[in-house]
Image: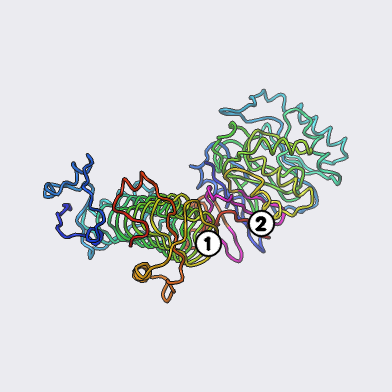
């Protein structure tokens, strides 16, 4: 069934890493297979942060295979060479697991060409690019992933996350949420539900040059919105369009550098509980996610069918 | 322990000629034969004293432990139980089959107070999906908002939400009353079979979709009617019943019920009528 959670602090930053971990851990029973975070951190905004992986963490049902870690170093060298060819400068690099990296880079040209070049290396996938977006996803529950990647200390303004129960595709990182809104910097999406016109939409979008990295139906939302925005739509316009363009049952969150949005399908078949105040919006698949950071008595509600909301920081 | 007492008094519905059919099913013969009422034992019920009051803090309990503790307190005769710190936990207060004053100081998660038969419940917060599912009797009052599937498949009692409710309120409802002070989402009264739903605010799309029977009253705007749902004229009986119920529900004071829209099933289903020959559409 999967669990999704999100929060946005308006007018200030907070310990969003720790807060989102609490929310996602409370939803662990909805999705124990993998956990993902899209944290909008208090970075200086000077350089791009690129999170990428050069191999998979594979469990049941995955179409990928576990590999010998020796290939990871070779792929990293090829990524570094491609970055150099693109004219990008690596300011800082961190290796967080044998297969995942965080690079801080200077680059000022087209991100789609950039992404195509980097991802031309076998098994390399850019998880996110942005000035503030830090997208981390891996197998395990929220606490395990947070500890593995040191997310508890991340401060920022807003965040969305996902606890996944694998249904439409296997258990691996490529199928885990959030999905980056390729090729837009700082755009991420999490989804709870199933999309039934995935292949029709995917074929049409691939013909328009959009890229898919997994067989997970949820990736379609990120690509769908990115394609709308590429053609000039605002985020909110793209989300409203998705209510009729996407078929199936869904509640999804999308975040950008300075905003957070939610959309619910016209059947209202997937749950969402929302808390809204002047300085904080918190939402999740279940109330216990919100209670994990706001134990005091508060008023929450379920958004209605076909509802789209967007909040700014 | 509570015994089922034989009652000779006819209910109002029986006096009106409704529910006169002889129940001859195996279950009814086994468990509800009036001749054997003195020997009847309603398992899982307790004789409680409303004046005997206690509090239970469930902050560090899971739902199973909390429900077992509530049962244990009822077995000790406590008739008024106040639950502290429910914190949105799921499945609290389920399966209570006797009279009880149950008060939650906070919000519930999914499936709160499901499958109950008799207690009076007040939730001083919000409830998640499927509150009071399969309720048989009693009264449940939610002070704030409720999630989707509010009152799914209830068969009796009064289920009241003073705020707004999500989608599919009263789905598969088989009796009783659901009363909502605010708005309701899409598919309200979906596949409803009997009973009444009252929404003082607006309702979403597909109201009463595929309803077999029952009545829905809406005070605000209707997103759209679902298949088989049609508008019916309000009668004096409707108005009297609504005024009475809203008073009991403690909401809608000075609300002009005569201006509400009444919605009933527009299609007659042969198999449903065969099952319930005395139930007529729109009967109050």
Tell me, yes or no, if residue B90 can be seen here: no
Tell me, yes or no, if residue A220 can be seen here: yes
User: Foreground mark, 2 or 1?
Assistant: 1
Question: Residue beneath label 1, please?
Answer: B222
Residue A101 location, x and y as percent?
A: 71, 37
The foreground one among A145 and B81 is B81
Residue A209 location, x and y as percent?
A: 79, 38
Q: Residue furthest bottom?
A: B254
Q: Chain of mark 2?
A: A
Q: Residues within 10 Å of mark 2 (few under 14, many from 20)?
A: many
The answer to whether dots 2 and 1 both sit on one chain is no
Q: Chain of mark 1?
A: B
- In the image, is B40 to the left or to the right of B147? left
The foreground one among A149 and A196 is A196
Give the magenta-colored segment's residue range: A252-281
Is residue B83 one of those drawn in magenta?
A: no
Check the image and report above or below for A165 versus B119: above
The residue drawn where x is 84% and y is 33% is A82
| Label 1 SS | loop
Is residue A266 one of those drawn in magenta?
A: yes
Question: Residue beneath label 2, please?
Answer: A157
């Amino acid at each position: 069934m999967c669990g999704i959670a999100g929060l946005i602090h308006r007018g200030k930053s907070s310990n969003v890493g720790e807060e989102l971990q609490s929310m996602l851990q409370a939803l662990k029973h909805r999705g124990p297979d993998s956990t993902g975070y899209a944290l909008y951190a208090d970075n200086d905004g000077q350089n791009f942060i690129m999170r990428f992986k050069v191999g998979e963490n594979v469990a049941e049902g995955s179409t990928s295979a576990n590999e010998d870690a020796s290939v990871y170093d070779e792929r990293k060298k090829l990524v570094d060479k491609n970055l150099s060819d693109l004219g990008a400068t690596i300011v800082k690099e961190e290796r967080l697991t044998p297969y995942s990296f965080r690079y801080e880079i200077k680059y000022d040209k087209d991100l789609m060409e950039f992404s195509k070049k980097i991802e031309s290396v076998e098994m390399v996938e850019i998880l996110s690019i942005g000035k503030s977006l830090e997208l981390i996803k891996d197998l395990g529950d929220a606490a395990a992933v947070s500890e593995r990647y040191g997310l508890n200390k991340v401060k920022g303004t807003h965040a969305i996350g996902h606890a996944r129960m694998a249904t439409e595709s296997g258990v691996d990182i490529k199928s885990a949420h959030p999905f980056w809104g390729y090729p837009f910097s700082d755009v991420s999406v999490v989804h709870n539900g199933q999309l039934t016109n995935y292949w029709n939409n995917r074929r049409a979008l691939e013909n328009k040059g959009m890229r898919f990295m997994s067989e997970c139906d949820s990736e379609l939302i990120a690509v769908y919105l990115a394609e709308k925005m590429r053609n000039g739509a605002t985020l909110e316009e793209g989300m409203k369009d998705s209510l009729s363009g996407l078929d199936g049952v869904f509640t999804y969150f999308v975040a950008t550098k300075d905003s957070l949005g939610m959309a619910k399908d016209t059947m209202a078949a997937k749950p969402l509980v929302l808390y809204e105040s002047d300085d904080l919006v918190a939402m999740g698949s279940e109330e216990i996610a919100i209670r994990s950071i706001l134990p005091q008595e508060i008023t929450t509600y379920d958004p209605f069918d076909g509802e789209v909301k967007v909040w700014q920081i | 322990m509570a015994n089922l007492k034989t009652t000779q008094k006819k209910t109002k519905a029986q006096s009106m000629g409704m529910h006169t059919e002889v129940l001859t099913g195996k279950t009814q013969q086994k468990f509800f034969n009036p001749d054997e009422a003195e020997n009847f034992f309603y398992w899982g019920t307790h004789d409680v004293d409303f004046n005997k009051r206690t509090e239970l803090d469930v902050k560090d309990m899971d739902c199973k432990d909390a429900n077992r503790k509530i049962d244990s307190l009822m077995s000790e005769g406590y008739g008024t139980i106040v639950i502290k710190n429910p914190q949105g936990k799921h499945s609290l207060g389920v399966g209570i089959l006797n009279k009880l004053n149950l008060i939650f100081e906070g919000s519930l998660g999914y499936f709160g107070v499901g499958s109950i038969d008799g207690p009076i419940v007040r939730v001083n917060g919000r409830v998640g999906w499927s509150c009071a599912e399969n309720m048989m009797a009693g009264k449940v009052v939610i002070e704030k908002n409720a999630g989707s599937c509010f009152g799914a498949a209830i068969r009796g009692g009064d289920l009241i939400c003073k705020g707004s409710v999500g989608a599919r309120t009263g789905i598969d409802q088989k009796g009783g009353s659901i009363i909502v002070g605010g708005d309701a989402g899409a598919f309200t009264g979906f596949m409803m079979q009997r009973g009444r739903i009252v929404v003082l605010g607006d309702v979403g799309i597909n109201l009463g979709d595929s309803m077999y029977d029952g009545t829905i009253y809406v005070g605000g705007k209707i997103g759209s009617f679902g298949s088989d749902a049609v508008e019916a004229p309000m009668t004096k009986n409707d108005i009297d019943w609504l005024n009475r119920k809203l008073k009991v529900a403690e909401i809608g004071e000075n609300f002009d019920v005569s201006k509400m829209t009444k919605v009933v099933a527009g299609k007659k289903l042969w198999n449903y009528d065969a099952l319930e020959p005395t139930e007529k559409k729109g009967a109050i």
